[in-house]
Amino acid sequence: MKQRILVVENNQTILELIGIVLEDAGYEVKLYTTEKAILSHIINFQPDAILLDIFKPTIEGTELCRQLKEAQSTAHIPVIVLSTHPQIAKVKEICADEIVPKPFDIDGLLDVLKDQLKTAS
């Protein structure tokens, strides 16, 4: 059975690229450009990991990440945050399992994902 990865990325081009790379690597992937109603999608899809784009490490920007780590039904799912913000490392203290700064190296992203999936299992 393929491991499932849910990706939330507001940039359509980056989202499509991540989707192609993850599918080529053998993952089952669901792609979303918005956080709107994402919690129900997460519950239905039951991903093994989540790649989450966060624009800024603010209360609003990290709210979904915090919700995922606080909810009993999703707390076990590794959340890997993608961002261009120079202070995004602060999000790891708040809720993220790992941070991947943009622009990112595809192989580096896959390595982080594999490490998080190993840690979670």
Image: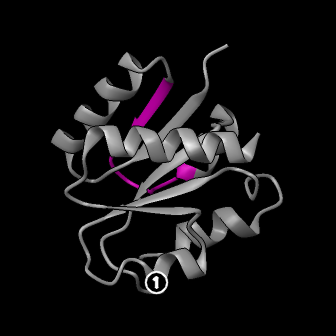
Q: Position of residue 73 (x, y in %)?
A: 80, 52
Q: Position of residue 2 (x, y in %)?
A: 61, 17
Residue 3 appears left or right of 99: right
Instruction: Decide: is 41 above or below 82.
Output: above
Residue 3 visible to the viewer: yes
- Tell me where residue 71 sits by quadrant: bottom right
Q: Residue at x 65, y 62 (%)?
A: 68
> How many C-alpha atoms fall within 10 Å of the one at disc 1: few (<14), some, or many (≥20)?
few
Q: Report if residue 60 is visible in the image.
A: no
Q: Is residue 95 left or right of residue 60?
A: right
- State yes or no: residue 36 in magenta: yes
Point 83% across, 59% down: residue: 72
Region rendered in magenta: 28-38
Q: How far from the left and from the top, in percent, is residue 64? A: 54, 67
Whether residue 86 is situated above or below residue 13 in the rendered picture: below
Dividing the image into 4 quarters, which one contains the C terminus? top right
- The x and y percentages for residue 13 are 16, 40
Q: Secondary structure at mark 1?
A: helix
The structure residue drawn at horizontal position 70% and vertical position 47%, both measured from the top left corner, is 119
Q: Is residue 80 magenta?
A: no
* Amino acid, disc 1: Lys
Label tally: 1
Q: Residue furthest left?
A: 13
- Judge whether 91 appears above or below 82 on screen: below
Q: Which color mode does the image show? A: one colour
**Residue bearing mark 1:** 90
